[in-house]
Image (cartoon, helix red, strand yellow):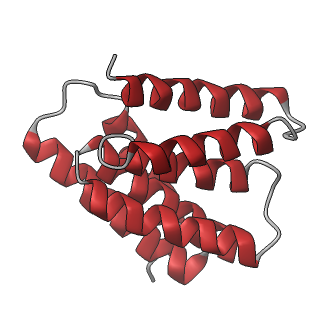
Amino acid sequence: MTDHRKLAVELFNHTWELLDNNQRTPDQNEEMIHAAHASRYHWGIAGTVKNHARGEWQIARVYAASGRFAESEHYADLYLRACKDNEFDDWDLPFAHEGLARAFAKTKKDASLLHLIEARQLGEKIAEEDDKQWLFTNLNEIAAMIDGT
């Protein structure tokens, strides 16, 4: 019998390994996209609503990292809607805005800035310092993308 939870976790982690590689080939970008979608598929079977939503965020992230911003926007929006419809952890909603800020950074800079500001404001309320720091590290990266540096 298929262990969907195990596959979801393994694919999620594999996706992050690919995301962390700043020298990805086009083939690795495609592999990363497929792995993120496959992880989300398995979370859809074995996970919670929170797992599903976070899978959407990871898909948004890989599309942005691959320069496919329209797709990134779509999945970041799915995560934002899930965050608004559910009570997740204190860092989920700020990261939903981070996802949209990232999706818009190269194509809709005004929208990106609005989501960046919202993410920063919401991020101040994150209780766990490591989670807050991870958010702000990502937001600073997006701000640099917007500025073109």
Against 49, is 19 above or below? above
The residue under the point 71% across, 56% down is 93
Q: Is residue 138 above or below residue 73?
A: above
In this rendered view, identify the residue nearer to me: 112 or 73.
112
Q: Position of residue 135 (x, y in %)?
A: 65, 34
Residue 25 occupies quadrant: top left
In this orientation, does residue 13 appear? no
In the rendered image, which quarter is residue 133 located in? top right
Residue 104 location (% of width, % of height)? 39, 49
Seen at 51% across and 50% down, the residue is 99
Q: Is residue 47 left or right of residue 25?
A: right
User: Which residue is outermost to the left?
Assistant: 26
x and y, in percent, of residue 82 in the image:
65, 74
User: Is residue 121 at least partly visible in the picture?
Assistant: yes
Question: Which residue lies at the image location 82% right of the left edge and 51% below the top edge?
Answer: 90
x%, y% of residue 58? Answer: 46, 54
- From the viewer's perspective, tell me whether residue 59 is left or right of residue 115: left
**Camera-side residue of 148 and 91:** 148
From the viewer's perspective, is 100 left or right of 27?
right
